[in-house]
Amino acid sequence: MAAGPYNYSYIFKYIIIGDMGVGKSCLLHQFTEKKFMADCPHTIGVEFGTRIIEVSGQKIKLQIWDTAGQERFRAVTRSYYRGAAGALMVYDITRRSTYNHLSSWLTDARNLTNPNTVIFLIGNKSDLEAQRDVTYEEAKQFADENGLMFLECSAKTGENVEEAFLDTARKIYQNIQDGSLDLNAAESGVQHKPSAPRNAINTDQPANKEGCAC
Amino acid sequence: MSDSEEEFASADEGEEESTNSQPKKSQTGQLGKKEEKTKAKGPGVQSVERKESANQSGSRTQQLTKSTDQKQKAESAAKQTANSKSSVTEKDDKGSVGQSKANPGQQQPTGKGKKVRKGKGAKKAAGKTDETDRNPEPVVVEKPETTTEKETEKSDTELKSTTMDVELKDNESGMPQETTSQPSIPEQPTDTAKAEVAKPMAELTAELSCTEPSASTAGGGVQDKQTEKPHSMSPQDGAKSIFDKLAGATHKEEKNGEKGAGSWGSWGGWGTSLLSTASKSVSTFTSQVGEGFSTVLETVEASLGAPSPEELANIEKAEEAVKEGEGEEGNKQSADESKQPENKDQRAAEKSTDDKGTEDTAEKPVTESSQEAPPEQDGSPSEAEGGAGGLGGWFSSFGKVTKKLEDTGKNIMTGGLDVLESIGKKTMDVISEKDPGFAHTKGLFKDKGSKPNLSQMLREAKEEAEEKAKMEEEHKEAQKAHFGTLFDEHQGLARLEALEMLSNQSEAKVQGTLGSLTEDQLQSIKLELVMIKEAFQLEDLDEPEDDEMDHNFAKLMTEHLLVVHAGTTPDKLNKGELFMVQSKIREYLKDSKEEQESGSKQNAKDLHRSAIQSLAELTSAAVGQFHKAGELLLLQQDDGANFADRASSLANLTRVLCTEVGIISNKFTQCMNAVAANSEDPDSINPLITNVYLEAGNSATYIQDAFQLLLPVMQMAALQSHANRD
């Protein structure tokens, strides 16, 4: 994973939501490990992934919360929305039901996150074009109507996976630059590390030395 | 004889002055004379003395004025006479020889007497120059007569006799001149002068038998070659001065009368030789400038240091008081004390001539330099007056001379610098012609001074980069063994945060649920909630529960987890991360212990890093386990399980985890202690061991915190279960 916690300027919290089996964990795995996990077990509650990216010369650590899609975990996973800077809402293009549930997920995302949270709509399994059940156009229209960013991706091939995560990060960063996202807000989902590496070292090392001296 | 001697002396003076330094020496000579007089009367009365000296030696002053006039006339006359001299010289010399012979005969026997008389006369005339004015008497200026006589004598006398005469004369006349410059006469130059003088002396005396000119020429030659060169910046000046001298000499001699004709031949020869030497000196001037200048400096310095004027004055005064007859010795003493005894002998006479020559040579540099530097001043009355002074006058004149020397020296220096500069420029031009890029190169060289060095900048940048890299490496190194960093790397923080969020949410729900419950419902559930809360009290966790350093972690964990999850725990959790991590750590410890027992050395730092990494990983896994347990607790509904038992199982689970952390840390520190025991520097390992203990405690704290976060979750689960049951 990432080399260290202090090699970046920001921490963006992502939360991946969507129906069970749309490939949320596979997208995360593809993004963090650049590998496709064929038989992905059901996620219990929430799993975590991190990756450090660079946006506009700023290193950003993405702390991604991959929630369980099972309906029974819904109550638990709702606890994890809070403080998310980005929400990846995933549906399966081969399964219309997952698309139809988007409004429910979107409601949760809207209600449980702050207004500036970037919600990115991802139509996964774009590699299965033959089994497509949801057209790009209607999903695009849905995204536009709800002010969502939208991409069709494939966790299997990795198509647009990077773009989805990075575009979300760029949007969040842009919001920070615009000032529309208040970093001081408790639930902005963004942690700023202005005292990035150097001070972190300085504060860490003395502690170590003290420990050594004991 | 006295007359003749006086005449000789005066003649010598006149001649030598006119001959040796007509233009130049005339000044110095005059000055010297005047100075001598002034000295004789006292240094304090310079101006008066000068006047007096002028009055006393009206002839002198006349001569002096004449000499100045002579110079001018001489210049014109010299040209005329120069031609005639050469031809006349031989005849005159021969003719003069006879005359001179007679004189020598007189002179030789009366050597001492002459000397004495001459000494007087010389003192008067030369004594002026000698500084040692032993002759308070006014110096009789019978020079014209004496000169003729002397010249005749000189010409007549053989080498020795002539030299004697010359010496005497020189002592009388030349000495004065010399004496002025005597203080400035270094011994070395005299030696060299002697050597050089000897040759020309022999030649000239043989040919011309005119010792004076020979001596003078010899001296002149020496001067020209050695001393003149440095001074005579322009060869023409030197030549002119020589001409002047010649002219002055001829002029005087012409005035002197018949006998003067005898000396003419010698003058002519001397003039020619002077001319030749002058030309030679001019040709060799450039090459010998430095040398000559150095010698001049030496001579000046030596002269400055050699005889302190006061001493000389005292000595001379004393001598004057004691013996007038020995005045010559005194003169010579003043000139060269070492040569005094020799003066009495004939051979000594030769040396004295040499001395003259050398003195002349030594003089000339000074006189000539003074003359050449400001040629106009030669005839200036001020100098003449100044020169008329006694001791003080001599001093002043000496100062002037030295000043002139300095001036000339400066001129030479500047001239030499100009030459060097021109050479340097030429060299640069040649270089730049051959190398077109030289200008650029030169620019680079020039810029080095003002601009910072490129190499230095690069070096600094490199050092900076190295330092930065080193710091980053240290940072990475520190991070590799930093518990917090590693804990976060294994998602421990995220798990803890998620657990915290879950706990907070549960806490809020619990409070909300309890507020909505009726009194009966509350009573029914209160006991269970209290029991759960009590189960979460871990008082004795800090003390190791079991002394047994090992326990079946997997078995205990599985048992407790089964109770927590009421047997419904997913398979994934049972074979989850925590077990894998624990078994991996145990495996590593087992391997490292085996390695240690087999004797292979281990790095304490590596062990430390492994320990911290293991603790962080284990702690993160434990937190994750607790997080998952909490999630599952919330999911399970209506399974009829006892939440108090679940809570105690969770507490046991925490204890097991903390014990495991303690065991792992102990095993790591044991390995590290073993390494430290074999290490040369155990002090460097001890801090690492204590750090492992510290982080182990940190790990246990994280685990217990996570456990405590589960309390609201457990309570919430109990409430949910209770509500469902109802």
Image (tube, coloured by chain):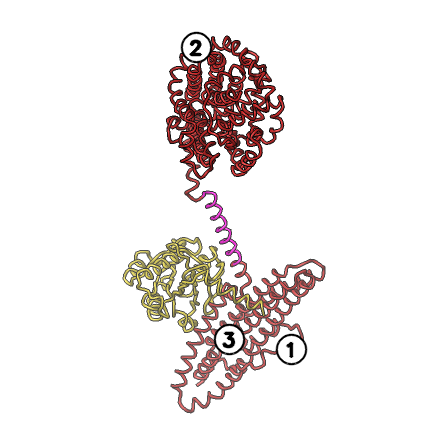
For the magenta stretch, what is the residue range?
Answer: B453-474
Q: Are labels 3 and 2 on one chain?
A: yes
Residue B369 horizontal/vertical position (percent): 45, 28
Tell me if residue B54 is in the magenta stretch.
no
Of residues B193 and B340, which is closer to you in this image?
B340
Residue B310: percent from left, percent from top: 52, 39
Task: Look at the numbered disc 3 and give the secondary structure of its residue.
Answer: helix
Q: Are marks 1 and 2 in contact (CB under 8 Å)?
A: no
Q: Is residue A122 above or below residue B3?
A: below
Mark 3 to mark 1 CA distance (whole Å)? 22 Å
Residue B546: mark in rendering: 1
Q: Earlier in the sequence, mark 3 or mark 1?
A: 1
* Colour-to-chain, yellow: A
Q: Is residue B406 visible?
A: no
Q: Secondary structure at mark 1?
A: loop
Write down the colour of chain B.
Answer: red
- The chain that hosts pointer 1 is B
Query: What amino acid type is highlighted by mark number 3?
Result: Asp
Q: Which of disc 2 and disc 1 is earlier in sequence?
A: 2
Instruction: Determine whether, in the image, residue A105 is placed left or right of residue B207.
Output: left
Lower position in the chain sequence, tag 3 or tag 2: 2
Q: Point out residue A122 in the picture as x, y percentages from the top left corner.
A: 37, 59
Residue that label 2 marks: B83
